[in-house]
Structure formats: C-alpha cells, structure tokens
Amino acid sequence: MQLSQKEQMLLEDLRGHEEMFIQKCNEYANQAQDPQLKQIFQNMAQHQKQHVQKISQRLTQTGAGQQTGQSMANQKDAILCHDMLSSEKYLSGAYNTAIFEMKDASIRQDLNSIQSDKQKHGEELFNYMQSKGMYQVH
C-alpha cells in the first residue's frame, strides 16, 4: 500500500517523537536513584524501541523508509528542542479546547492571548530547528 505524503510525514514525525522518548527514558534511567524507577525507565525505552521498529517497518514496506540522515552537531539540543516543541503543541491544543468551553468572553480573550504566545514560541523553536537540520519539512 502506498502512503500519501501526509501519512508518510505523520509516521516520520511519530518515529522521531518515539526516538526522542527513548533518549529521554535512557537519560532518566541514568539519573534515577531508585533501582525500581531505573528499571521502569529502561523497560519504557525497550517498549518504545519496538514502536520505532513497527513504524520503520511500515515506512520501509511502502518505500518511504529513508531516514533523513541528518547529522546533528548537538544531539542534546535536538532532544531539548523536540521535547519543548511537543510541549508547546500540546499546550496550544489544551488552550484551544479551554477557549471553546469558557462562557466568559474576557477569560476567552486572555486564554487566546496566551495561546497566541504558545504559537509564537513554537514557531521560534520550529524555525530554529529547521535552520539547524533538526526538523525536516517535505
């Protein structure tokens, strides 16, 4: 089955988020003091690797599996950027829902202003990441 360009981009984006999550799990496992918590993070990383494999298989089966091959000078910065951009996306969506569910127009206006700031921060991160080869748009 041939993927549409949008489907391919979504799968590649999900794979990138999963890879970032694996790196965070490994980093958190190294920082954890409690052995049980360390094991939880390690187990989570293992499960995420299975997710990456599934997504990569789907991309490969459809002829879309080429990785971007970007060599990032600073992997830590890339992880931080992807994590922060994901957080901004999530928060922007949460504000969007809240705006639609507020009766008071002045509260909606305040939340809309905050959401606008979230979008500006996300745009700034996106532009930085794109300029550094951390985020590819096809």
Image (cartoon, grey):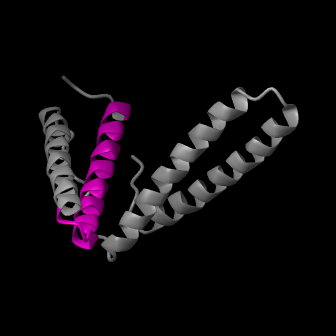
Q: Is residue 119 left or right of residue 29?
A: right
Tell me, yes or no, if residue 69 can be seen here. Answer: no
Can residue 34 be found in the magenta stretch?
Answer: yes
The percent coordinates of residue 83 (x first, y second) are 42, 58
- Residue in the picture at 39% in, 46% down: 138
Q: Residue furthest top?
A: 1
Figure quadrant of residue 70: bottom left
Image spot of residue 119 (x, y percent): 63, 50
Above or below, 95 relative to 24: above
**Relative side of 93 to 100, left or right:** left
Q: Decide which of 80, 71 is in the foreground and name it.
A: 80
- Front one among 3 and 79: 79
Image quarter of the N terminus: top left
- Magenta: predominant secondary structure element? helix
Q: Nearer the viewer, residue 134 or 17?
A: 17
Q: Up-down: is 25 above or below 105? A: below
Residue 16 placement (x, y as % from top left) = 30, 51
Residue bounds of the magenta highlight: 6-35
Q: Residue at x 70, y 27 (%)?
A: 100
Residue furthest toward the right?
106
Q: Is residue 106 visible?
A: yes
State yes or no: residue 123 in magenta: no
Rendered position, 11 above or below 23 = above
Picture quadrant where residue 63 is located: top left
Q: Nearer the viewer, residue 61 or 29?
A: 29
- At x 69%, y 54%, the residue is 117
Q: Is residue 127 left or right of residue 77?
A: right
In this view, 93 is above or below 68: above
